[in-house]
Image: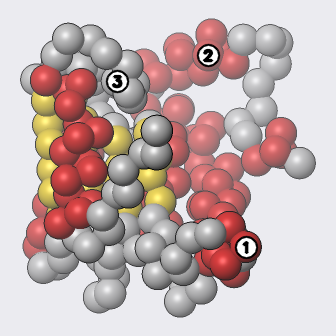
Amino acid sequence: MLKYRLVHVTGTDPGQQMTPLLKDWDKFKAVVAPVVALDLADGKKAIEYVRGHAKELGVQPNRIGIMGFSAGGTVADGVGYSYSVANRPDFIASQYAYLAVLPKRPVPTDAPPLFVAAASDDQLGLTSQSVQLYSAWQAAGKPAELHIYAKGGHGFGTKTQQLPVDSWLDRFGAWLAQQGFPIAAAKP
């Protein structure tokens, strides 16, 4: 089923096929736009599923967030702009997302808190979209935090680069605690 929710590519190396499209954002948007609605539906359904099965999963139904990196950030942010009571995330974490493909919508009046991280040297040039997302939340008076690192590139994730960006996960944990979502210490 998952293969039907992805951009169709031929061959065995989708990265090789998709990379040239990144030189023409309009062409890239045209290719990915048809699957975005499906991706957002998957994101909403995931939240709804976890919330509906919270007890058996051992999680609190009012502490379910969504986090995404790159295309996953697009999903997280899209869900953050359009949700129902059943699939509203309790927080959003967006890392170096591509937002131009999302429909233009106002920030919801009950928007969840937002955490954004990106690097200025993002090879795809997506940093400004992270800033715009943060600015939209701020303009709507919603809780948001933004971290833009000088270096880290697109896809910094949790890899160690001996750069300040390596600490973004610590910043995220502190932000979660500040929002009322403390992280439990790992058991030895």
Q: Name the residue under label 2.
A: 15
Density class for disc 3 (Cα within 10 Å; few <14, some 14-19, many ≥20) is many
Report x, y in % for residue 78.
Answer: 47, 62
Pointer 2 or 3: first along the chain? 2
At label 3, the amino acid type is Phe
Q: Mark 3 points at which residue?
A: 156
Density class for disc 2 (Cα within 10 Å; few <14, some 14-19, many ≥20) is few
Residue at point 24%, 25% (across, down): 166
Left or right placement of residue 34 versus residue 29 in this view: right
At label 1, the amino acid type is Glu
What kind of element bears circle 3? loop
Q: Nearer the viewer, residue 92 or 131?
A: 92
Report x, y in % for residue 104.
Answer: 38, 67
Viewer can see residue 120: no
Question: Is the residue 8 above or below the residue 21 in the image?
Answer: below
Q: Nearer the viewer's eye, disc 3 or disc 1?
A: 1
Residue at point 53%, 22% (across, down): 21
Pointer 3 or 1: first along the chain? 1
Q: Name the residue under label 1.
A: 56
Instruction: Tell me if label 3 and label 1 are in contact, CB under 8 Å.
Output: no
Q: Nearer the viewer's eye, disc 1 or disc 2?
A: 1
